[in-house]
Amino acid sequence: MDAGDCGGELNFTNDLAYLLATSSDPQLRNGREALKLARRVVRSSEMMRGRSLTAPPSHRRAASLTDD
């Protein structure tokens, strides 16, 4: 994968994390997986940009969601 592909992959991973964190469908919602993906996005973004970023509030919410 070249560097140009990373942005698209990060956007996809970010969108998937958001969906898993905020879905109203309990079968789709998965806070643990959302948080794992969001952390991956943040780490990758930090490496690509060479600076520290924080996860968006919607992703931080994932930590408090339960898997029913």
Image: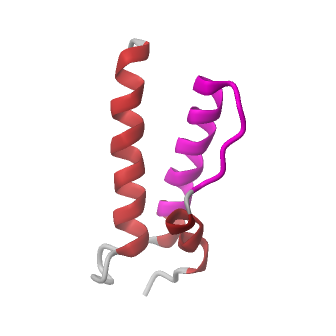
- Residue appearing at x 36%, y 34% in the figure: 9
* Residues in magenta, as a range: 34-55
**Looking at the image, residue 65 lies above or below residue 8:** below
Q: Position of residue 21 (x, y in %)?
A: 43, 70
Q: Is residue 58 left or right of residue 15?
A: right
Counting from the top left corner in percent of width and height, residue 39 is at 59, 50
- Image location of residue 62, percent across then percent down: 53, 71
Residue sitting farthest toward the bottom: 68
Q: Residue at x 50, y 51 (%)?
A: 37
Q: Nearer the viewer, residue 38 or 68?
A: 38
Q: Looking at the picture, tell me which residue is in the foreground, 67 or 51.
A: 51
For the N terminus, the quadrant is top left
Above or below — where is 22 with respect to 46? below
Report the residue at 35% width, 21% height from top: 5
**Residue 49 image-quadrant placement:** top right
Image-quadrant location for residue 26: bottom left
Q: Quadrant of the C terminus?
A: bottom left
Q: Is residue 46 magenta?
A: yes
Image coords of residue 15 (percent x, y): 35, 53
Q: Residue at x 60, y 72 (%)?
A: 63
